[in-house]
């Protein structure tokens, strides 16, 4: 049997509560997904489930499905808790609006991991009060009944039946005779609530596909809806197992009972009653390169687009001393074990975001000193957060640097006249190139010192992006293109000229909404890049993604950044569905681009 833990939901109420909390007591928990919040006694909800399922070899494998927004949190949790990282599936969504629905998430694991076994499915962000819950007993009952199994419990007084899936169960056979997903009052007398905790036989899993075909709307893709359909419409026998006394699901719990604030993180006690200090945050929208030069250091042309899927946010507030706050995931200072430290360091090196904040502050001060801008004697605290996947060439660092500059300008009340946009763009670039020796492309920030035109984002067709789940096979070999360009190599100069023409033609194609033309140009853009950068530099991972999209599904495709991710345009909606599935099965993360 296989166990699947679902934690792919977006926008949990608790997470929003924490973000909006003004006491400052919970600020260290901002951005942490519900399943990883410290629960009763400081234990995370997911720790509880992991302990319950990993014991006594009940399962041949345990998988975890999450979304692209919280993926990093779970990856860290996994390395610290001896959970196999390759068993975490990233569904590619970063927003509530683009969520897949739990049934699709379940189907994603089963398909992409090619599972052919009975499965136990658990929503691993629900809290269970019984700390000694025995999963083995559930499996025993499932084996005995030889049918699907759903766990239910008796609702407490005051809990509304309209908030859950309500089941009617035959007392003799234990078969669930009726399932009502969030029923209106009066529809059923039953107060037995089903929770997302099921055992499904491998033969039944094929109905997931059928269900998804019948239910296109994401609202209808909740697991409760699936169970309702299986029981009421398909009439597959589903048995109910009642949770033993003492096992309750805590529904609407407020953050105060849910976890204890960590006092060592708290600001001084006096501040508790006061409002949170005035904060300013700046979000840098993320840009992807749609057409043109691979990077803009070549005096060429490029078209880039702001998207909502990924972002970086930097926050500044006045404080007693000057503090740069390390990001709990990107600048780890605490580890699960020495082995955990080893795994994280091997995978990600020592390059968190803190150095970006520090280098930006340094450059900012230097700029102001040299340009006669006096800065007030004030200290500040800077912190950042981002969901931009790392190491897939998507310039997450420029996004953080830009947002930091905006924070500093606001904090020291600098205007656009003090630090004009073109100079600001140069400053951002210099932080990376001079201070941190990151060879950054320019296309991912608004390069105002060049000649640039805004285009109507409504011209954008439905692009998709995909990136490597394991970025280690994206190209690592340095190309000599810049060197050749500086030396006036005619092939490179010619290519750069052609990139610029492609950008011009793409502009026309976008404006006239000629997607066929745009698709052709994107392919040509990639071919040109391939010809001057060589396959060795592009790396097998990038080439594999391009090949998959273009050869097998006829989608236009190119690299949106420096490698590790691809952006594509597929004009046939049916092929797009298959393309998405193929990428997921190849271990990539697939996202539909949401233009900003
Ligand atoms: C800034 O912080 C330092 C300690 O880190 C302190 O000595 C200094 O007085 C602070 N400056 C202001 C203006 O508060
Ligand atoms: C900007 O582009 C326009 C039209 O392509 C051109 O006429 C103008 O000289 C350019 N300006 C700069 C500063 O390059
Ligand atoms: C769109 O582009 C294609 C390919 O370049 C071309 O054949 C076609 O005529 C264009 N369509 C329109 C409406 O301009």
Image: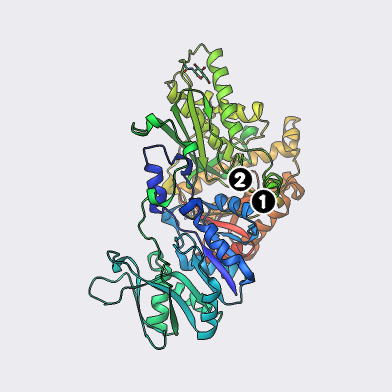
Residue 491 in view here? yes
| Sequence-first tag of 1 and 2 | 2
Q: Nearer the viewer, residue 145 or 268?
A: 268
- Residue 151: x and y in percent read 44, 74
* Helix, strand or loop status at disc 1: helix
* Helix, strand or loop status at disc 2: loop
Q: Residue at x 63, y 59 (%)?
A: 83
Q: Residue at x 69, y 54 (%)?
A: 541
Label 1: how many Cα within 10 Å (few below 14, some 14–19, many 20+): many
Q: CA distance from mark 1 to mark 2?
A: 9 Å
Label 2: how many Cα within 10 Å (few below 14, some 14–19, many 20+): some
Residue at numbered disc 1: 471
- Residue 250: x and y in percent read 39, 60
- Residue 530: x and y in percent read 70, 48
Direction top: furthest residue: 372
Mark 1 in CB contact with mark 2 (< 8 angstroms) = yes
Looking at the image, residue 491 sits to the left or right of residue 38; the answer is right
């Amino acid at each position: 049997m296989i166990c699947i833990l679902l934690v792919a939901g977006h926008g949990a109420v608790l997470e929003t509560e924490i973000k909006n909390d003004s006491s400052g007591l919970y600020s260290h928990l901002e951005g942490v997904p519900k399943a990883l919040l410290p629960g009763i006694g400081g234990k995370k909800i997911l720790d509880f489930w992991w302990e319950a399922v990993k014991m006594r070899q009940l399962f041949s494998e345990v998988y975890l499905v999450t979304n692209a927004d919280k993926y990093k949190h779970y990856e860290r949790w996994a390395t610290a808790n001896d959970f196999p990282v390759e068993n975490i599936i990233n569904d590619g969504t970063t927003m509530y609006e683009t969520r897949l629905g739990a049934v699709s998430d379940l189907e994603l694991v089963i398909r992409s991991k090619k599972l052919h076994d009975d499965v136990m499915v658990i929503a691993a962000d629900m809290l269970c009060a019984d700390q000694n819950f025995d999963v083995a007993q559930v499996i025993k009952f499932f084996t005995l009944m030889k049918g699907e199994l759903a766990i239910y419990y008796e609702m407490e007084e005051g809990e509304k039946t309209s908030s859950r899936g309500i089941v009617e169960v035959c007392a003799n056979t234990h078969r669930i005779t009726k399932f009502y997903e969030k029923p209106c009052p009066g529809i059923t007398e039953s107060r037995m609530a089903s929770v997302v905790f099921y055992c499904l036989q491998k033969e039944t899993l094929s109905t997931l596909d059928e269900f998804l075909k019948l239910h296109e709307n994401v609202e209808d893709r909740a697991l409760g809806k699936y169970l309702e359909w299986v029981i009421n419409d398909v009439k597959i026998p589903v048995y109910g197992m009642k949770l033993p006394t003492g096992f309750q699901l805590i529904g609407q719990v407020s953050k105060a009972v849910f976890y204890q604030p960590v006092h060592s993180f708290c600001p001084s006690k006096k501040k508790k009653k006061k409002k949170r200090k005035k904060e300013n945050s700046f979000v840098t929208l993320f840009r992807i390169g749609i057409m043109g030069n691979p990077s803009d250091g070549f005096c060429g042309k490029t078209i880039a687009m702001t998207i909502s899927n990924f972002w970086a946010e930097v926050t500044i507030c006045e404080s007693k001393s000057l503090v740069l706050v390390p990001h709990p995931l990107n600048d780890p200072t605490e580890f699960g074990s020495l082995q955990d430290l080893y795994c994280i360091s091997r995978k990600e090196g020592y390059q968190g975001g803190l150095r970006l904040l520090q280098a930006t502050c340094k450059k900012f001060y230097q700029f102001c000193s040299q340009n006669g801008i006096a800065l007030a004697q004030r200290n500040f605290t800077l912190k950042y957060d981002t969901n931009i996947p790392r190491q897939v060439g998507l310039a997450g660092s420029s996004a953080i640097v830009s947002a930091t500059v905006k924070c500093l300008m606001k904090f020291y009340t600098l205007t656009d006249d003090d630090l004009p946009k073109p100079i600001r763009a140069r400053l951002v670039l210099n932080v990376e190139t001079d201070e941190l020796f990151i060879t950054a492309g320019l296309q991912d920030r608004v390069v105002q010192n060049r000649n640039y035109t805004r285009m109507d984002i409504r011209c954008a067709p439905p692009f998709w992006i995909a990136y490597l789940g394991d970025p280690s096979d994206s190209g690592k070999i340095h190309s000599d293109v810049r060197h050749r360009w500086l030396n006036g190599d005619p092939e490179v100069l010619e290519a750069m000229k052609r990139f610029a023409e492609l950008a011009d033609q793409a502009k026309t194609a976008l404006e006239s909404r000629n997607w066929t033309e745009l698709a052709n140009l994107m392919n040509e853009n990639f071919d040109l890049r391939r010809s001057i950068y060589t396959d060795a530099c592009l790396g097998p991972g990038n080439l594999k993604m391009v090949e998959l999209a273009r050869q097998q599904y006829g989608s236009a495709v190119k690299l949106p950044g420096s490698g590790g991710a691809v952006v594509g345009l597929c004009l046939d909606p049916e092929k797009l569905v298959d393309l998405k599935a193929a990428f997921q099965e190849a271990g990539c993360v697939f996202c539909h681009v949401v233009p900003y």
